[in-house]
Amino acid sequence: MIGSLDPDQNERERRLLDAIREQGATPENIRLFRDLILSYYRAHGRDLPWRHTADPYRILVSEIMLQQTQVERVAVKYGEFLERFGDFESLARAPRSEVLLAWQGMGYNRRAIALQETARRVVDDHGGELPADVETLATFPGIGNATASAIVAYAFNMPVVYVETNIRRIFIHFFFQDRKDVRDDEVLPLVERTLDHENPREWYSAMMDYGTVLKKRTANPNRRSASYSRQSRFEGSDRQIRGRILALVLEEGTVTEKEVILRLCEEPGRVKRILGDLAREGFVAESEGAYTCR
């Protein structure tokens, strides 16, 4: 079960932490580290829908969804989204309003637009085939190096080396026990040394699950990362209001600024500013004071 280790795994982790503190990242400690991560995964790994496929399109969708949304929510929306847009072609050619409507409840709606723009590039520039190359993927909308690397690892089982939140958490916990301001360029060599080159897909899945365990069991090791920043409060934020406005436009089809103010009971100046931002960013179109989804 995610969130706990069995007594044997707890004891193995404790011994390994002591050994790494005393001896460092020796070959034997690296071996024990791999064994601990994989044994937990093989006993308690999560049964997630995107782990039953290596289809590049489905992996892409899952990785974009997982960027800023909890796994439990993605597990629900993932299947619904794929039912409506089952491949690159259907997503690329869909009206934007339909894509945004299918995305509702996920938050960070710009990811939906980026995902559709990526699908269009794959169809128009790559013959409908997702490139199996990190550098190329990292140039696509909404895909940075970490997401590009994850796609390549899970879709193509290639031994790429990268750092993201769960990976960073694990390596700081084990290999930087008494350090603050740990830099990613210190973590990456250890990621490379521990990587399972034969089956990186399974290895990175195992890391995701062990990272989730650590988040529940310990004070977040990522707070000791040099790149750590506390997420801003969502309730009452512009991000929340943006989502509510976009949901209203999608629900009604067309709304005026006055209607938005009345329906959401928000300060007029704030609504006007956010509507302007949404129009500039391509989420909505404005014509004679009325706003529609593009």
Image: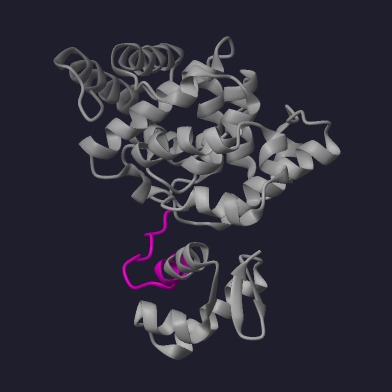
Residue 29, image x, y percentages = 38, 16
Q: Is residue 264 above or below residue 218?
A: below
Rendered view: 273 above or below 224: below
Residue 236 sits inside the magenta stretch: yes
Q: Is residue 141 left or right of residue 60?
A: right
Give the side of residue 196 with respect to residue 8, left or right: right
Q: Quadrant of residue 234?
A: bottom left
Q: Position of residue 108 (x, y in %)?
A: 49, 57
In percent of the image, x 26 and y 27: which residue is there? 2
Quarter of the image with the N terminus in it: top left
Residue 125 in the image: state x and y as whole percent: 85, 39
Write down the region rendered in magenta.
Answer: 228-243
- Residue furthest to the left in view is 7
* Residue found 49% across the figure and 45% down from its top: 67
Instruction: State left or right for residue 279 relative to residue 181.
Output: right
Quick check: 216 left or right of 258?
left
Q: Quadrant location of the C terminus?
A: bottom right
Snapshot colouring? one colour
